Amino acid sequence: MAKVSMTMKDIFHQRAVPIIENFLATEGLFEDLERDEMVEVIFDTFLRNCSPEELQEMAEEILSDRIRRILGGQVLYGLISDFTPEEMEEFDAAVRDMRKMW
């Protein structure tokens, strides 16, 4: 029997979209994020960074972790996008200080 090749979009919708929807529905931190926008952002990220085969073979735990990190980044971006230049300088300094501690 011939092997059916799935597109990146098909694999993404089969594997990642349910995870995204679950996070958006169950994690309070992500409640203000828009589903369709997040699906698009995360799809674009995976499209740039992995092949369809890698996405298909990725362990569920790793896939969930990567999606959670992207969603977390979107939350952070939403928070800091309203910062004044002075607030952004303070934020950058705090992040630099935290990195030194690691």
Image: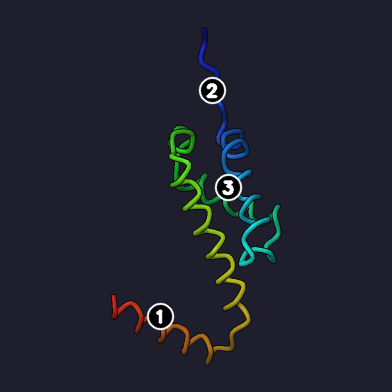
In the displayed structure image, the side of residue 67 where residue 10 appears, left or right:
right
Of 30 and 8, nearer the camera is: 30
Residue shown at 57%/31% (left/top)?
A: 7
In front of the other: 31 or 5: 31
Render colour scheme: rainbow
C-alpha gap between disc 2 and disc 3: 18 Å
Helix, strand or loop status at disc 1: helix
Q: Which residue is mark 1?
A: 95
Q: CA distance from mark 1 to mark 2?
A: 44 Å
Q: Which residue is mark 3?
A: 43
Placement of the C terminus among the 4 image quadrants: bottom left
Task: Single out the mark in the foreground, 3 or 1.
Answer: 1
Check contact, mark 3 vs mark 1: CB within 8 A: no
Please tell me how many numbered marks the rendered image carries: 3
Mark 3 residue element: helix
Disc 1 marks which amino acid? Answer: Val
Category of crowding for the residue at label 3, using alpha-carbon neighbours closer than 10 angstroms: few (below 14), some (14–19), many (at least 20): some
The amino acid type of the residue labelled 3 equals Phe
The picture places residue 54, in percent across and down from the top left corner, at 43, 37
Q: Position of residue 1 (x, y in %)?
A: 52, 7
Return the x and y of residue 94 as percentages of the image width and height.
41, 85
- From the image, tell me which residue sits under label 2: 5
Residue at 56% x, 49% y: name it. 44
Residue farthest toward the bottom in the current orientation of the protein: 86
